[in-house]
Image (spheres, helix red, strand yellow):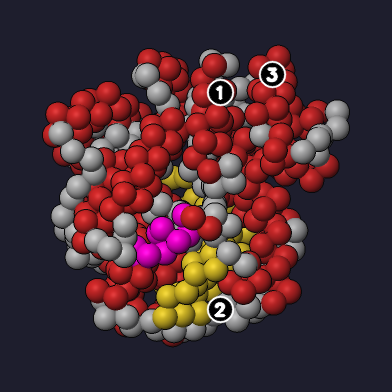
Amino acid sequence: MKLTLIGGGGVRSPLFVMSVLRWQDRVHVDELCLFDIDEHRLELFGAINQEVVRRAGSPFRLTTTTDARTALIGADHVVTTIRVGLEQGRALDERIAINHGVLGQETTGPGGFAMALRSIPAILGYAALLNEVSPNAWMYNFTNPAGLVTQALRDAGFERTIGICDGANGGQGAFALYAGVPHEAIRAEVFGLNHLSWCRAAWLDGIDILPRSLADDRFLRSMQTAFDPALVRQVGMHLNEYLYYYHSAEQAVAAISAESKTRGEEIVELNKRLIQQLEEIGVEKNPEKALRAFFGYERRRGSTYMHYAFGGMTIEEAERQTAEAGMGFDADIPAEAGEGYAGVALSIIEAIQTNKTLYTALNVANRGAISGMADDDVVEVSCKVENGQIDPIEIGEVPAFQLNLMKTIKLYERLTIQAIRQRSRSLAIQALMVHPLILSYTRASSLVDAYLKAHAEYLGTWGS
């Protein structure tokens, strides 16, 4: 079985490779191919990944290539995780939004919109090539904004495409931890859109443990810390953490605006520092030191993730702590890494390869699962994977509040895809006017013009 990672030169590709190693006895990979258009990064992180595989006894062949056709020929499963414009593009997206007084976040609101402008044309190109050279392959899209990109892929006719996100199963994991049972012991009912979803039930041995969990202050303090407990109980469901950007929008904008740099600008600096350090070390000369640098980077990167919502260290505090330690990135090499999106993709691959039944939340065509949404709307919903088929589980009616927010964001997504397809500035403005975090025509038009100018290298010329 050949598994291909599009974006294999990414700074977090070693985590993906470590997950494949962990799953190897269950998925039986013969070749893991890392593809990237950035030759230098692919060489650098390819060497780290080769070392990770070597230390595990080389249970499969790891290959690298900058040729997309080579990467996709013979592929059975393909995971996409690319960032057109690299982290500098993300930093621009977020800073432009903040300068306009609205949320600066890479997937939600204008930041996600700007990323979609660059991501969708690139991913459609890879999907077309995959359909040509390996038409029976499955594509698992993790390229952000994952739901919007997956909608564009499905609209273009690529039906063997699934949107994946580790956050989709956040409720399932939270309830499993609370109950002290394995993740798979919980049967969750998830509905919504990517980064806009809710878990309305968590079944354990035939009993829905969600009501008693939400009634427990201990659960809310440990599992839903981004939200006021009164809000969680009012909604009566587990909330996807990205709903913080809707329910606490003004707080998020104020917190991000008050910092010396956005999350994207922080990542630009962290990635630059890591790459410089790896170049100085020489991965092949000193693989132990290179791996310690990588996992030190991961620890530092994770220390400030959504800190304004979860109460972690601020960017300034994390930088001060690093400076006081008097060293660059350095950390012990873990035996295994957190799986994130890789675990979602690999669990589906296992189910397809072995005919094992899997229940998980994915981004797929609605097909009647959620009442009020169109059949061809890509939704984030609990699914059953069985006998090579991936089917959404019937959710039925959902509360009006959630449904109307979903329909509004879906309209925004549809308009964004049309704008990209037609290269239309006016449709792009309409898309942002629909989004509840923007709404204003003057703000939407100014944002669209700023993004078209900032990313002209990738977007080219658009009409009115």
Magenta stretch, main secondary structure, is helix
| Circle nearer the N terminus (1, 2) | 2
CA–CA distance between discs 1 and 3? 10 Å
Q: Position of residue 413 (x, y in %)?
A: 66, 41
Element type at marker 2?
loop
Answer left or right for 18 relative to 419. left
Please tell me the numbered disc located at residue 446.
3
Q: Give the amino acid type for the residue marked by disc 1 in the picture.
A: Ala
Q: Position of residue 352 (x, y in %)?
A: 49, 79
Residue 258 magenta-highlighted: no
Q: Residues within 10 Å of mark 1 (few under 14, many from 20)?
A: many
**262 lies above or below 296:** above
Q: Position of residue 197 (x, y in %)?
A: 47, 45
Q: Position of residue 338 (x, y in %)?
A: 29, 58
| Circle nearer the N terminus (3, 2) | 2
Please tell me the numbered disc located at residue 76.
2
| Circle nearer the N terminus (1, 3) | 1
Residue at coordinates 45% horizontally, 20% vertically from top-left? 253
